[in-house]
Image (cartoon, rainbow, N blue to C red):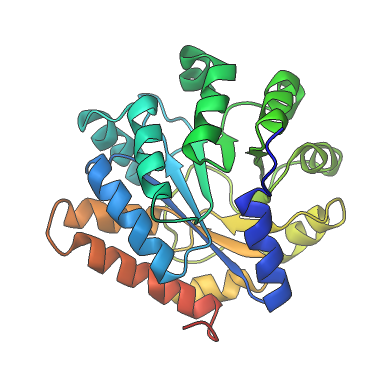
């Protein structure tokens, strides 16, 4: 067992003490390349991001909408592999202690070797894995390996998840629960789902873990609105979309981290 307290647990515990909401940001790793991923991570840390999710590029990203699919494609084209991404994570760790999560499809870990991947991810400085296509019912060995390496098991709950299954999922998760606030794939929305309040209450009845709400938040106003229901918000496609538009432009990192800072400001007005 690793002796250190997981950075995700530490961060949410601090946010709770300060009475603040958390900001979770998702980007596609290696989009446009891994050096930009490293620079974005360091800039996001300064901009007020509490947890950074790095999408590991995969050729068949079933849970992702077009914006994130294209980011995965660009990540593959830039030569990003799980091994190279873990090297980049180790580089980020030299300058930042921001909690880091890999958003990954199981096939990639299976191919790498599950136990070795989890060990290598922990060694590089990863704090949690969100494995999109691994249901809790099939993940006992995975959960044990994660616990032994001090890595959080982050599970998703959807609006269509029945209550008995919510109870099962949240009991098996660690770190935080990611509530996907709408059906379908990832993507920006003009308005947020109106079932968020009820569903968050349902999840809260079964767990004391922080609840991070995502899928569809695309501006500071929506961020503020959704943050009132949970402990954190997750913003992905809106950030990925800006990275796509700006590409390798010299001001990409500044502009994207500026947008992220606005989101942080909206949900944590008292922060710098």
The residue located at (54%, 18%) in the rendering is: 116
Q: How many marks?
A: 0
Q: Position of residue 39 (x, y in %)?
A: 28, 54
Q: Nearer the viewer, residue 252 or 14?
A: 14
Q: What percent of the width, then of the height, locates residue 38?
A: 31, 49
Residue at 57%, 26% (x, y): give it.
118
At 35% from the left edge and 24% from the top edge, which residue is drawn? 59
Q: Which quarter of the figure has residue 153?
A: top right
In the displayed structure image, the side of residue 39 where residue 50 appears, left or right: right
Q: Give the residue at the far bottom of this rendering.
A: 270
Looking at the rendering, which quadrant does residue 198 occupy? bottom right
**Percent coordinates x, y for residue 239 in the rendering:** 35, 58
**Residue drawn at the location 39% of the way across and 62% of the way down:** 44
Is 170 left, or right, of 74 in this rendering? right
In the picture, the quarter occupied by the N terminus is top right
Q: Where residue 100 appears, x then y in whole percent?
A: 50, 48
Whether residue 230 is visible, yes or no, is no
- Front residue of 117/230: it is 117
Vertical arrangement, residue 208 with respect to residue 77, above or below:
below
Q: Decide: is 49 above or below 74.
A: below
Q: Is residue 265 visible?
A: yes
């Amino acid at each position: 067992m690793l002796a250190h307290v997981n950075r995700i647990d530490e961060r949410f515990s601090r946010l709770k003490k300060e009475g603040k909401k958390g900001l979770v940001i998702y980007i596609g790793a290696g989009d446009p390349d891994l050096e930009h991923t490293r620079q974005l991570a360091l800039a996001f840390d300064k901009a007020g991001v509490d947890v950074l999710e790095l999408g590991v590029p995969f050729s068949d990203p079933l849970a992702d909408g077009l914006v994130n699919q294209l980011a995965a494609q660009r990540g593959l084209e830039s030569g990003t592999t799980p091994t190279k991404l873990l090297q980049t994570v180790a580089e980020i760790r030299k300058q930042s202690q921001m909690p880091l999560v890999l958003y990954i499809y199981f096939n990639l870990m299976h191919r790498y070797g599950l136990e070795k991947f989890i060990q290598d991810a922990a060694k590089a400085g990863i704090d949690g894995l969100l494995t999109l296509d691994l249901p809790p019912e099939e993940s006992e060995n995975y959960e044990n390996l994660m616990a032994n390496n001090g890595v959080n098991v982050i599970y998703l709950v959807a609006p269509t998840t029945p209550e008995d299954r919510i109870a099962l999922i949240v009991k098996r998760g660690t770190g935080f629960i990611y509530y996907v606030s709408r059906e379908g794939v990832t993507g920006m929305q003009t308005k947020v789902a109106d079932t968020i309040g009820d569903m968050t209450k349902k999840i809260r009845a079964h767990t004391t873990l922080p609840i991070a709400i995502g899928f569809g938040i695309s501006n500071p106003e929506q961020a503020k609105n959704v943050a009132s229901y949970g402990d954190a918000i997750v913003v992905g496609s809106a950030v990925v979309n800006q990275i796509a538009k700006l590409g390798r432009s010299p001001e990409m990192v500044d502009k994207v981290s500026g947008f992220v800072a606005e989101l942080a400001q909206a949900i944590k007005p008292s922060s710098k």
